[in-house]
Amino acid sequence: MKKLLAFMLMFTFAIVLVGCGGDLVPQSVEITGTQTVEAGKDVQLTAAVLPEGVEQGVTWSSARTDIASVDTNGKVTGVKVGATIIRATSTAVETVYGQIRITVTASGEISKPDLGGYTIKIAQAGHALQGIDPFHPDYAAQNKVAKQQAWEWVEENYNCEIQVVAYPDDAEWGTPRWNYILNQAAAQTADYDFYTVPDARIGTFVEGQAIIDVSDWYALYGQGYMDAVYQQSGTYKGSLYSITDGESGIYNVMYYNINLLAELGMEKTPAEMFNEGTWTYTAFKDYAVAAQTALNAKGEGYWAVAGCSPYYWVGMTNAGGVKIADISTMKMNLKDPVAVQAATILKEIKAAGAMDPLKQVDQNVASWMNGKALFSSGDLWFVNTSNRWPENLWGEGELTKYGYVPFPRPDAITKAQQKLGLTGTATFVMPNFRDYSAFGAECTAENVYRALVDTFLKTKEFQEGAPGYDEQALLQAFAERYAESPDSVQAFMFIAGNAKDIGFYEPLAEPGNAVINTGYSTFSTEVNKFVMGDYASWADAIDPLIETLEENLRKAFS
C-alpha cells in the first residue's frame, strides 16, 4: 500500500546489449545533479555510463532548448520558465542513454499556463460519474476532501473548469464505446478531452489513430506519479498512452462464503490458514476435498470450488512468483513447473469431485450465486456490487458475508515468498482532434494534460498533508470494504499492504487483457479442459496455443 511519490524523478533507460567475446559494453547511463534551475542560472549534471569500466563518453542534449540548454560538459542553463528533458547518450553505443527532467523556475515556482476559461471534459459512463467526480454526492473514495481541494487548485491556477460528463447513450460499455471512440477519430473530431477506458483497449485506439502518445508529456510533467505497473499496462508498442493515478493491487480474487463455511464444521478458515503460513497448493486441495465431503451431506448441487478454473490457475501460478505473460522476455511461461503444478492441483480437485464442472464467470457462477459453492473466483470489485455479488446475495445483513483468501502458493515456498500478479486498470486516454483554438495560445492539448496530471499530484499532496493522515488506518478501512471477517481482513491487509514488494505486472490477471481473454477464448477453454480431465498432459492442452499467444504478447508490448 505504501507508495512514495517522488516530486523529482530521474529517468534512466537501460537497453541491455550483449557483447562479443565477453567485452563490457555500455548498458545504461545514470545522471545525477540538481533538477531545478532558475532562468538565467546554471546547474551542473554528471553522467556515469554503466557498468563500471566501460567507455564514459557521452553527448548531452536538451529536448527543449528554448527552456534550458546544455553544453558538452553537462552544464545546464535555464532559459525560461518550464520543463525539459536533458539526455546523456553514450558515445560508444548511441542507443544507450539516460534522461533527467529539469524544471526552470522564475522565482522558485513554476507558473501555470492560462487555459482561457476552458472546460476540461472527462467522459465516463453515466451510471459511474461518482467514481471520478469528487464533488458528486456519491463519491466515496477516502481522498474526497483532498481531491476536491486539488480540483479547485487546478481550476484557479489554470483558469479552467473540470467536468465529468456521461458518454452518449449509444456509447455504452464494450464494442459500442470502442466504436464511438474510433468513429470520432475517423471523423477527425473529439467531443471530450479525456476518455475513460480499460487500458487493455489502448492498442485498439492507437491502431485507429484515436489517442495521443503522452510519453514526452509524462516525462516533462508527471513527476513520477504513475504506478510502475500502470505504466507497463498503459504502454503500447513502446509508447505511453495511459493517464491514471492510484496504485495497482488486488484484482483477480479467490473468495469464500463465510456462513456456508461455518455450517461445515471445518477446523480453520482458509484465511486463518493463510495467516498462519499453511495455505499452499496441497493444503487447498485437501481443504476442498474435506469441504466437499461435508457439502455432500447437505444434498445435491453443492461444490467446494466453483467459477472459472483458468482464473484460479493464473492466481495460483502468480502466487508462486511466475509471470505467465512476461513482457520483459516476450515469452509465455506456460510450461514453467509452477504453472504446471497449479494446473495439476486444480485437476486433482476436480478428479476428487470437489469442483463444479461448469466453467462460469462473474455473476453467472450459478452455484455461487445460489449459495451452494464454498469458493468462487472473480474480481475484487464484485464484492457488494449490485450487478455482480450484491450485499444481500444470500440474505439480508449478516446472512451474506464474503471471505477473502489469497490464492494458494506452491508447497515449496513460504508465506514471506508469496507473490501477486498485478493488472492494468481503467484509465484516461486523450483523444486526437480536440479543438482548443478558441481559448488562447496557451490552451493546448499539452497544457490540458498538465492540468489533469496536477490534479493527481495535488490530491496526493493535500491528502498526505492533512492533519491525522494515517496510512495504516486507510489500509484497514479499504480492507474492510472487501473482507467481512477479522481473519479475512488480516489476510487482505498483508497482501494489499505488501503489493509493491510482492507484486509484478501480469496481464493475464485481468480477464480482458491485451494478450488473451482468460474467461472467454480458445485458450481458456483448453486450460479448463485439462482441469476437467479431457487431456492426459498439460502440454497436450497448451502447446498448440503458445505461438499465437506469444505473437499477441509481442503485438501488444514489444
Image (cartoon, grey):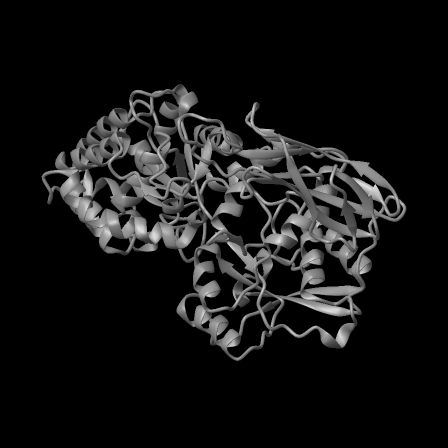
Q: Quadrant of residue 270?
A: top left
- Residue 256 percent across, percent down from the top left: 34, 38
- Residue 480 percent across, percent down from the top left: 52, 37
User: 417 above or below 133?
Assistant: above
Look at the image and tell me in which quarter the N terminus lies.
top right
Horizontal side of residue 508 vs 492, given as left or right: left
- Residue 417 percent across, percent down from the top left: 41, 23
Front-most of residues 180 and 26: 26
Q: Residue at position x 17%, y 39% from top?
A: 538
Residue 371 seen anywhere in this rendered image of the structure? yes
In the rendered image, the residue lying farthest to the bottom is: 187
- Residue 483 percent across, percent down from the top left: 46, 37
Horizontal side of residue 230 vs 8, given as left or right: left
User: 428 above or below 99?
Assistant: below
Residue 359 seen anywhere in this rendered image of the structure? no
Tell me how many marks there are. 0
Front-most of residues 99 and 275: 99
Q: Quadrant of residue 36?
A: top right
Q: Residue at position x 16%, y 47% from top?
A: 529
Front-most of residues 378 and 53: 53
Horizontal side of residue 51 vs 306, given as left or right: right
Q: Quadrant of residue 120?
A: bottom right
